[in-house]
Amino acid sequence: MADRHVPTIVPPRHLYKVEEAAQLLSISRSATYELIRAGELNTVTIGRSRRVPATAISDYIGRLLSGAEVRYDQAS
């Protein structure tokens, strides 16, 4: 089966504060930091500030969507 790419729309900014990324993902700030610690959500550091690239948010959502696909040819 061909891999389907589902486009994810993120508002047109390149970098977000962790709190803003949490709002975009509809999760708590602490849950966002857990994703960062686990390597699930990439960040960059500018000086002493941590920022989440828009592409990292889109990539994370894409991985969630691809992992959530239901396949009817496999037992659950």
Image (cartoon, rainbow, N blue to C red):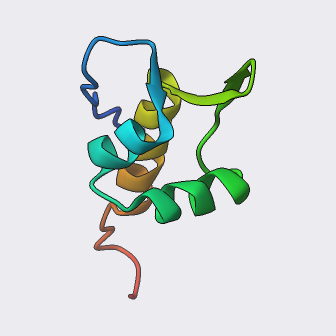
Residue 69 rendering spot, x and y as whole percentages: 33, 60
User: Is 57 or 44 nearer to us in this picture?
Assistant: 44
Q: Residue at x 38, y 88 (%)?
A: 76
Q: Residue at x 64, y 50 (%)?
A: 36
User: Is 7 or 38 nearer to us in this picture?
Assistant: 38
Residue 59 rendering spot, x and y as whole percentages: 49, 35
The answer to which quarter of the image holds residue 34 is bottom right
Please give the count of numbered marks on the rendered protein: 0
Q: Residue at x 47, y 48 (%)?
A: 63
Above or below residue 59? Residue 33 is below
Above or below residue 27? Residue 74 is below
Residue 28 rendering spot, x and y as whole percentages: 38, 62
Residue 2 appears in the figure: no
Q: Residue at x 64, y 37 (%)?
A: 42
* Furthest residue in direction front, as rendered: 48
Residue 61 rendering spot, x and y as whole percentages: 39, 44
Residue 51 appears in the figure: yes
* Furthest residue in direction bottom, as rendered: 76
User: Is 61 or 29 nearer to us in this picture?
Assistant: 29
User: Is 41 or 6 nearer to us in this picture?
Assistant: 41
